[in-house]
Image: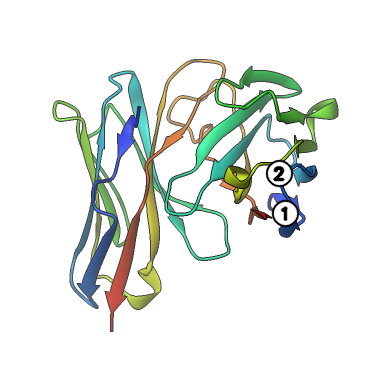
Amino acid sequence: EAGVAQSPRYKIIEKRQSVAFWCNPISGHATLYWYQQILGQGPKLLIQFQNNGVVDDSQLPKDRFSAERLKGVDSTLKIQPAKLEDSAVYLCASSLGGLGYGSGANVLTFGAGSRLTVL
Amino acid sequence: DQQVKQNSPSLSVQEGRISILNCDYTNSMFDYFLWYKKYPAEGPTFLISISSIKDKNEDGRFTVFLNKSAKHLSLHIVPSQPGDSAVYFCAASPYSGGYQKVTFGTGTKLQVIP
């Protein structure tokens, strides 16, 4: 099966500019995640979608970050305006989601990530 | 508040020996645990998981042990191979029915020396 696709792989912008990242999850995966991974740290969940509804965005800086998942498939994460501390790898992941305790429903498949450098 | 902790940022092991990576968690609602491996410039890939109804799960060279009373889990790799050199993330999620929020630790960089 095709994996999780992300683009662009690399992006360099200046602070106060805007940037958008795109993710196409594995076909049939209901749950889509955006994680931020700062160098030397573990992935931090920004937002989680179940189909096209948001189920968790408690750690998303909503004054500058926004995300949408139209039609429950592709997703876009936008940052506007960017700050220096937004320099990180933005990882998109998907999973089957839904009921499935211990069945692998919460095994995430990650894309290769989009590395953002803010100057 | 770091709910999943990996206190060893790095580990070096000789090829053929055992690698033991440790993980501690604080949230008693966690009941499903996963290990991911990450190579540079790639996304994390799923390695092995364990649910709280078990205390051990084995898959080839990889074994995960869970000690619920201590809120501790460990990943054993035997024998270690140079290709195992990567960053390993511990992750945990509660069973919440409709969806599962997965929380990651900070990672341990494993170097297997030939």
- Kindly identify which numbered label has been placed on residue A2: 1
Residue A83, x across and y down, in percent: 65, 42
N-terminal-most mark, 2 or 1: 1
Q: Is residue A102 above or below residue B11?
A: above
Residue at (54% x, 33% y) in the render: A45
Judged from this view, the residue extending furthest toward the right is A71
Q: Does residue B65 show up?
A: no
Q: Nearer the viewer, residue B65 or A17?
A: A17
Look at mark 2 in the image and give the residue it sits on: A26
| Vertical placement of residue A59 versus B47, above or below | above
In the current view of this chain or complex, which residue is farthest to the left?
A: B70
Q: Amino acid at mark 2?
A: Ile
Q: Quadrant of the N terminus of chain B?
A: top left
Residue A12 x/y as whole percent: 73, 58
For the residue marked with disc 1, what is the amino acid? Ala
Q: Is residue A84 in view?
A: yes
Query: How was the colour assigned to the protein in this rendering?
Result: rainbow
Closer to us: B30 or A107: B30
In the rendered image, residue B61, in percent from the top left (x then y), is placed at 29, 62
